[in-house]
Image (tube, helix red, strand yellow):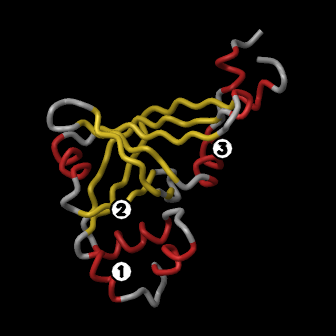
Amino acid sequence: MPSRRELIRMTPEEVRAYLLSQRRIILVTNGPDGMPHPVPMNYGLDDESRILITSFRKAQKVTNLERDPRATLLVESGETYAELKSVIAYADAEIVTDPDQIAAGMARINADAQLSGSISGAMSEQVRASIAKRVLLRFTPFRTVSWDHGKLGTFY
């Protein structure tokens, strides 16, 4: 009989579908004092299931990743125990400074309609100016942990 852990683990396809259905992720970098530095961010995925986040170049999270490119990312949902669903990705970060790649990454981020509408072919001057100050953070997971308590049905 499979363990409960095995029963609730998501397949890679389920992980991708879940990550595509969510909007917010908690990005945890290693701060200058060794303490975790967690921040909530909007995110997206590329075709290779790498996690994409944009940030201002001078942000603490970017400074942390320049010093140590390892990060942990968490997406979670559910109000009751039976609804709990989560993915933790342990990842290596890449800091991308190319403006075209930043704009392409911004277009993939799950955001509200107003923000995602501004990252179109006719993007506003404000967005164009913002890209010059931004980086694209691209995270390649090397280990993923997931669970979906809904897979247990009514048996906890």
Figure check: 112 above or below 53? below
Q: Position of residue 115 (x, y in %)?
A: 48, 74
- Image coords of residue 153 (percent x, y): 83, 26
Left or right: 30 as drawn, with respect to 119: left
Whether the residues at callouts 1 and 2 have beta carbons within 8 Å, the answer is no
Res. 13 mark: 3
Q: Is residue 152 left or right of residue 26?
A: right
Query: Which of marks 3 and 1 precedes in the sequence?
Result: 3
Q: Position of residue 130 (x, y in %)?
A: 29, 76
Q: Which SS class for mark 3?
A: helix
Q: Nearer the viewer, residue 16 or 27?
A: 27
* C-beta proximity under 8 Å, tags 1 and 3: no
In the rendered image, which residue does mark 1 sit on? Answer: 127
**Crowd around label 3: few <14 · some 14–19 · many ≥20 (10 Å):** few
- Pick the residue in front: 35 or 138: 35
Mark 2 residue type = Thr
Mark 2 = which residue? 54
Residue at 69% in and 27% down = 81
Q: Secondary structure at mark 1?
A: helix
Type of the residue with mark 3? Glu
Instruction: Please report the residue visible at 76 percent of the width from the left and 29 percent of the height from the top.
Output: 151
* Closer mark to the observer between disc 3 and disc 2: 2
